Image: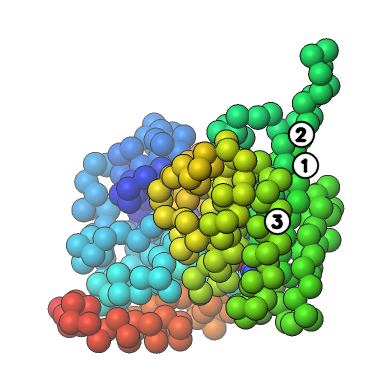
Amino acid sequence: MQLGILKESAAGESRVALLPESLKPLVAQGIAITVECGAGVAAGGSDAAYVEAGATVTSDRAAILASADILPVVNMPGEAEQGRLKAGAVVIGFLKPLDEPGALATAIARKATLFSMELVPRISRAQSMDALSSMATVAGYKAVVDAAGLLPRLFPMLITAAGTVPPARVFVIGAGVAGLQAIATARRLGAMVEAYDVRAAAGEQVRSLGAKFLDVDLGGINTEGGGGYAAELSEEALERGRDLITKTAEHSDVIVTTAQVPGRPAPKLIRRAAVEAMRSGSVLVDLAAPAGGNCELTKPGVTQIIGGVTLLAPLNLASKVAVDASKLYGRNVINFLGLIVKKGEMHVDLGDEVLAGACVAHDGSPVNPRVAKLLDAALTTHQVEGKLQA
Ligand code: NAD
């Protein structure tokens, strides 16, 4: 069985699907691994290290695509490369099946089996495969470190002979995986931290990290959707959150905002007035930028300076910490592969809850009902229809 590792081609992508350190269990099963030259360099994995780990390194990208039975990736290769996949190949990665289902049509037509790391069910058995949490952890850390680098103030309180410097004040909106890591990082740097989330359960986690949890009376409405996620709120409930955020922004040096509702655009929580209320030199990091952003001024992927406030809207912050992001992602991928590869043989059992949840398409058809519906809609466009018929 052949496994291929490509150099990621998306702009700004520095991660790699598997680093040399992750290959041992695959090599031990007799799986032949071929790696594209330079695939891991930006993530700390040299070509020589891949060879040492038992892989073959080649510059022939097309040959890897054509021969791989298994292709772990970070991002889905483009349409032309999907057309070169080995028929029936298994592709595993961040495939964006709910955002860009039409972009998978060529691979589906090649009868590739597509597993999306975004769709791995968040159940305890699959925790070691939860790549969304891995990347959110890295992004939450990096958001605070980047903000600290830009802020013209110190994070910790300092008592010096020249006087006392008060600690920076950090406000974290959305205390999920990324938000909790942002809180922990800001606390380690000595900042005073406040946090807000609509899920009451987040309060205890925020307090356990030494931060203050800001409660808003939302009139007793249900704020929890399924699986520990937030529900989409009414306009009135969102407005109460916005009031709190505007008030808290006035004394915050840094805001890191992470609020999301799965499958929906990010809630707009930060008004222009809140940004204008921040002191000149303050920093706002909108980690919800890939879903449109939490701030009404956010332009995804663009850094702006608005009235002296720096507004960052990064689209792929995990890639900026490519070494550890790739290490964590690779472990998630290896654990996932453990469900389909045993003793060097591949067996895809879609009766397994984790595999069924993550499977986007198998044997030429979409498997996930949400993706099937979205793909159906995409199929009504001429372009995608042509691809599937080709
Ligand atoms: P996420 O990225 O979807 O959202 C980030 C945070 O934004 C969440 O905490 C959410 O409550 C909050 N939010 C949404 N709308 C908001 C609003 N209008 N105002 C303020 N905050 C808002 O979520 P996530 O970080 O991926 O995960 C959230 C939760 O899911 C976790 O805290 C945990 O309970 C659960 N989870 C479980 C597992 C597991 O069991 N394996 C893994 C990861 C997460």
Q: Which of pointers 1 and 2 lies earlier in the amino acid sequence?
A: 2
The residue singled out by tag 2 in the image is: 167
Task: Answer few, some or many: residues within 10 Å of disc 3's Cα (few below 14, many 20 plus, some between 14 and 19).
Answer: some
The residue singled out by tag 1 in the image is: 192
Q: Amino acid at mark 1?
A: Met
Q: Please say whether residue 34 is visible from this viewpoint.
A: no
Asked if disc 2 is less than 8 Å from ligand 1, the answer is no
Q: Which mark is residue 247?
A: 3
Going 83% across and 61% down the picture, which residue do you hit?
Answer: 204
Q: Amino acid at mark 2?
A: Pro
Residue 350 position, x and y percent, is 50, 81
Asked if disc 3 is less than 8 Å from ligand 1, the answer is no
Label 3 residue SS: helix
Going 53% across and 57% down the picture, which residue do you hit?
Answer: 272
Q: Quadrant of the C terminus?
A: bottom left
Residue 253 position, x and y percent, is 66, 41
Residue 283 position, x and y percent, is 57, 42
As measured in the structure, the alpha-carbon distance from the residue carrying label 3 to the one carrying label 2 is 19 Å
Q: Are marks 1 and 2 in contact (CB under 8 Å)?
A: yes
Which of the 4 image quadrants contains residue 50? top left
Q: Which of pointers 3 and 2 lies earlier in the amino acid sequence?
A: 2
Going 69% across and 29% down the picture, which residue do you hit?
Answer: 154
Vertical order, 220 against 169 (above or below): below
Tell us which disc is closer to us: 3 or 2.
Answer: 3
